[in-house]
Amino acid sequence: MATEFPRTEPAWPLRAYLVLIGMATRRETATYTQLNDKIDRGGARFLAHSLGHLMRWCKNNNLPGLTSLVVDNETGLPAEGLTTVEPDKFPAEQQKVFRYDWFSHLPPTIDELGKS
């Protein structure tokens, strides 16, 4: 029988990872609200912690900043909390994310994300 995702940290970053790699292959971005709706986090304001885990995991593994695909509704840019990419480099980082073959390796484990 299929096992449901736990509704705890750090399972939320893994849920976000799976949605974001799909978006990357389609060359899409999402607002914080749209991502929240896809992973059912309980509100866009709760995403910062989850995205922080994922942002650090990408950085620690020398991967493009996957979380750069999550953007503010008004500015169309990632929020100030995305510290692994300089603000003037967001479009270039998003292009790296779009070009990267995310399906060439296994996704992070919940345990790995919890340590990030």
Image (cartoon, rainbow, N blue to C red):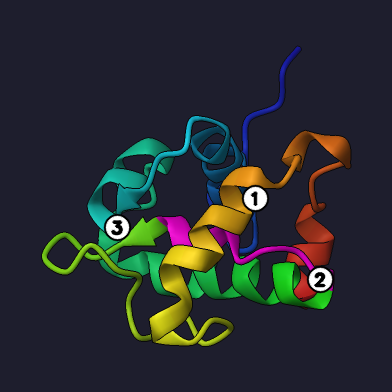
For label 3, the crowd category at 10 Å Cα-Cα, with few meaning under 14, some 14 to 19 and many 20 or more, is many
Q: Is residue 107 left or right of residue 30?
A: right
Disc 1 is placed on an element classified as helix
Residue 9 coordinates in the image, percent (x, y): 59, 63
The mark closer to the camera, 3 or 1, is 3
Q: Is residue 68 magenta?
A: yes
- Residue farthest right in this picture: 105
Q: Is residue 20 left or right of residue 31?
A: right
Residue 80 is tagged as none
Identity, as a three-letter code, of the amino acid under mark 2: Asn
Q: Which residues are magenta?
A: 61-69
Q: Identify the residue shown where x is 11% and y is 65%.
A: 74
Choose between 115 and 27: the one closer to the eye. 27
Gap between marks 2 and 3 measured at Cα: 24 Å
Query: Upstream in the sequence, badge 3 or badge 1?
Result: 1
Residue 62 is tagged as 2
On-image quarter of the N terminus = top right
Q: Which residue is mark 1?
A: 14
Identity, as a three-letter code, of the amino acid under mark 3: Tyr
The mark closer to the camera, 2 or 3, is 2
Query: Can see residue 114?
Result: yes
Gap between marks 1 and 2 measured at Cα: 17 Å
Q: Is residue 81 left or right of residue 11?
A: left
Query: Upstream in the sequence, badge 2 or badge 3?
Result: 3
Choose between 39 and 28: the one closer to the eye. 28
Residue 64 vs 59, above or below: the answer is above
Identity, as a three-letter code, of the amino acid under mark 1: Leu
Q: Identify the residue shown where x is 74% and y is 70%.
A: 57
Residues at marks 1 and 2 touching, judged by CB atoms closer than 8 Å: no
Residue 25 coordinates in the image, percent (x, y): 57, 33
